[in-house]
RNA sequence: UGGGAUAUCGCCAAGCGGUAAGGCACCGGGUUUUGAUCUCGGCAUCCCCAGGUUCGAAUCCUGGUAUCCCAGCCA
């Protein structure tokens, strides 16, 4: 674990509520839950919720359940239940006991629905979806009662049973809670709590053809699991009335310290989509290579990109938890990963746009070994060997035939320091018919290894390099934001705001030490940025490095 | 006059009647064989607006304004 995890606990309005509940004795322990629907991969927005729920459980010595909110089989898939478990654990959290599923409670949920019918608080309605909408009224005009609202308990019991038995078609009827068609809360205008769906469920198979709705299920699931604080996002604020109504009317849930729902604002990140549906579109339309494409804001994508679990946790800590709408700058995320990697990532040299240098006064067959620190500020990380010879590669961007004094790299006729090695001076260069520089001819000063020129010459620039004969070829995947608009979700069409340069692939070279770079191992390629070996495509034969984040660059 | 929420620095965010924390970003100085790191310093006389209460208000009251959410048999 990074040391960032050991710092002071976060403080936010939810923790304040918990502190109070503990002080007043309303609760003696806290029990939260993270309740994703298995209809897509988890993204960084879920990370915020995960860190909140599991973080609270951790800090208060409580428990946090992982519960799949699987009440809509048509949209869900077993693959997602697997990926979600993996992502939660990769983030560094472990749920309490067995994994929970809302579908575990289908039998109980059914009984509770019957209880409501028996209390004359639910009825089977045969209005179709269009009629239901018309009867519901609008934001400003109250709805009107369904003609089926006053059916007898006996009839409703029979009808609901027939629904369960599959005697009605999908959409033909639904079970509704009898609340108030004139309520200012739209969700209280006799909400549907059970609908007919002849769908195969990934957990319950074909046992059911009626499935409970979210509002009916969630509160009961929380109550069954003895959740104390049910945390969700702001758009469920109105739904809280229904959450409470359902539990208020069921005999099993009358304890005054029963579960309560609290809402916080969801994460919005500049330039990124945060809806599973829209992310799914990107996958389906091959805009990206999959849910774990390194440009995706999914946990799997961030991981593949080189983000560490600790950096994501730190990010979630820094953004805080409030009820205010927000739009977090990407700079915040960048800062978190840079902070960690600056301290922990081994340094290495990689040339992304190679151009050859021939050091004419260096002995022809000679290859010498130079020992370089793995980390410039942390000696304990040791040293690594670097080959050096007459022929090396430097980046094409690090050489110019002419330049002003602000350019601190190699200039024709001038000197520059090769990182960890000698001072060289360029004499001339070859170009191809298009004018591209193909070879740069230099001389080196053999007394400058590990020290400055004895005559007091000042060499201002330092550039990185890789020895030619030992260099390993490598593919560099240079990622940029997927969208050109800060808020792609607000765009009319996603295609309009797609960044055509979100992925640029370069073929270059890396120092030989990286030949066995392990998947997801991150390095700092000096003067370039942090890169990690791709967890799917990189191998000794074909090295592939993903740009996690470039180095901070304050140079105009 | 549908209802529910939210308004503190460019972006986040503490603050809970006693005189504006912190982070990110940004701007300067220093160190540096990464234009990185590190380091030193700067960065809200003011808290959406207008009144009011108070010795004292970002915090309390009144009235405005702005923004977000709700009319799926989605979650």
Image: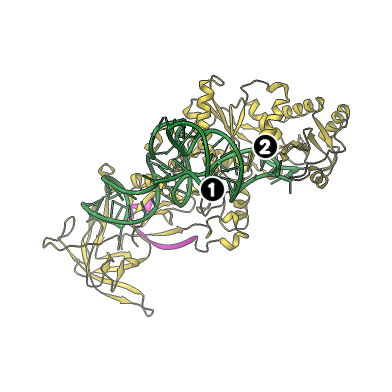
Left or right: A352, with A121 as reference point: left
Residue sitting at x 68%, y 32%: A243
Disc 2 secondary structure class: helix
Residue A315 at what x, y percent from top left? 45, 43
Which image quarter holds the N terminus of chain A? Answer: top left
Residue B12 picture location, percent across and down: 48, 44
Labels 1 and 2 in the same subunit:
yes
Range of the magenta residues? A502-518
Which percent across, then down, holds residue A347? 32, 51
Find residue A447 and report its image quarter: bottom left
Q: Looking at this view, is A498 or A287 the one in front? A: A498
Measured in 3D between alpha carbons, the distance from the residue under mark 1 to the one under mark 2, in whole angstroms, is 22 Å
Residue A516 belongs to the span the image colors magenta = yes
Rendered image: mark on residue A268:
1
| Chain depicted in green | B
Give A39 or B75, whichever is nearer the viewer: B75
Mark seen at residue A239: 2
For the C terminus of chain A, the quadrant is bottom left
> Disc 1 sits on a residue from what chain?
A
Chain A shown in which color? Answer: yellow
């Amino acid at each position: 674990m990074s040391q960032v995890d050991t710092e002071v606990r976060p403080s936010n309005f939810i923790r304040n509520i918990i502190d109070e509940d503990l002080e007043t004795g309303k609760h003696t322990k806290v029990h939260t839950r993270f309740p994703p629907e298995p209809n897509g991969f988890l993204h960084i927005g879920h990370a915020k919720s995960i860190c909140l729920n599991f973080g609270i459980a951790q800090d208060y010595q409580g428990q946090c359940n992982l519960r799949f909110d699987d009440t809509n089989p048509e949209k869900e898939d077993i693959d997602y239940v697997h990926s979600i478990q993996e992502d939660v654990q990769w983030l560094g959290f472990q749920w309490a006991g067995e994994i929970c599923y809302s579908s575990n409670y289908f039998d109980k949920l059914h009984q509770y629905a019957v209880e409501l019918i028996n209390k004359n608080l639910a009825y089977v309605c045969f209005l179709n979806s269009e009629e239901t909408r018309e009867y519901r009224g609008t934001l400003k005009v109250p709805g009107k009662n369904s003609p089926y609202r006053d059916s007898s308990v006996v009839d409703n019991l029979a009808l609901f049973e027939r629904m369960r038995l599959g005697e009605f078609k999908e959409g033909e009827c639904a079970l509704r809670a009898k609340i108030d068609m004139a309520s200012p809360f739209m969700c209280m205008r006799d909400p549907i709590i059970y609908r007919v769906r002849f769908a195969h469920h990934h957990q319950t198979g074909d046992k059911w053809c009626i499935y409970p709705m979210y509002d009916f299920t969630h509160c009961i699931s929380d109550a069954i699991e003895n959740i104390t604080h049910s945390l969700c996002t702001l758009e469920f604020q109105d739904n809280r009335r229904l959450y409470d109504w359902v539990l208020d009317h069921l005999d099993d849930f009358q304890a005054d310290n029963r579960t309560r729902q609290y809402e916080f604002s969801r994460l919005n990140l500049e330039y990124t989509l945060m809806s599973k549906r829209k992310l799914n579109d990107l996958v389906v339309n091959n805009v990206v290579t999959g849910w774990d494409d390194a440009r995706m804001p999914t946990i799997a994508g961030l991981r593949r990109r080189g983000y560490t679990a600790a950096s994501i946790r730190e990010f979630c800590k820094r953004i805080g938890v409030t009820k205010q709408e927000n739009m977090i700058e990407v700079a915040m995320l960048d800062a978190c990963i840079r902070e960690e990697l600056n301290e922990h990532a081994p340094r290495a040299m990689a040339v992304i746009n190679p151009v050859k240098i021939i050091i004419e006064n260096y002995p022809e067959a000679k290859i010498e070994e130079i020992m370089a620190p793995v980390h410039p500020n942390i000696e304990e990380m040791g040293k690594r060997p670097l080959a050096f010879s007459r022929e090396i590669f430097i980046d094409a961007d690090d050489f110019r035939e002419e330049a002003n004094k602000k350019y601190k790299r190699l200039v024709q006729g001038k000197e520059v320091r090769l990182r960890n090695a000698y001072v060289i001076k360029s004499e001339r260069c070859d170009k191809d018919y298009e004018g591209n520089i193909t070879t740069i001819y230099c001389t080196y000063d053999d007394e400058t290894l590990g020290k400055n020129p004895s005559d007091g010459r000042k060499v201002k620039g330092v550039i990185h390099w890789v020895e030619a004969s030992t260099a390993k070829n490598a593919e560099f995947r240079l990622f940029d934001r997927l969208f050109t608009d800060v808020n792609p979700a607000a765009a009319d069409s996603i295609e309009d705001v797609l960044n055509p340069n979100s992925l640029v692939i370069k073929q270059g070279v890396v120092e030989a030490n990286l030949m066995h770079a392990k998947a997801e191992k991150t390095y700092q390629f000096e003067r370039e940025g942090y890169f990690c070996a791709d967890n799917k495509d990189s191998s000794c034969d074909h090295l592939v490095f993903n740009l996690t984040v470039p180095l901070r660059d304050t140079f105009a």
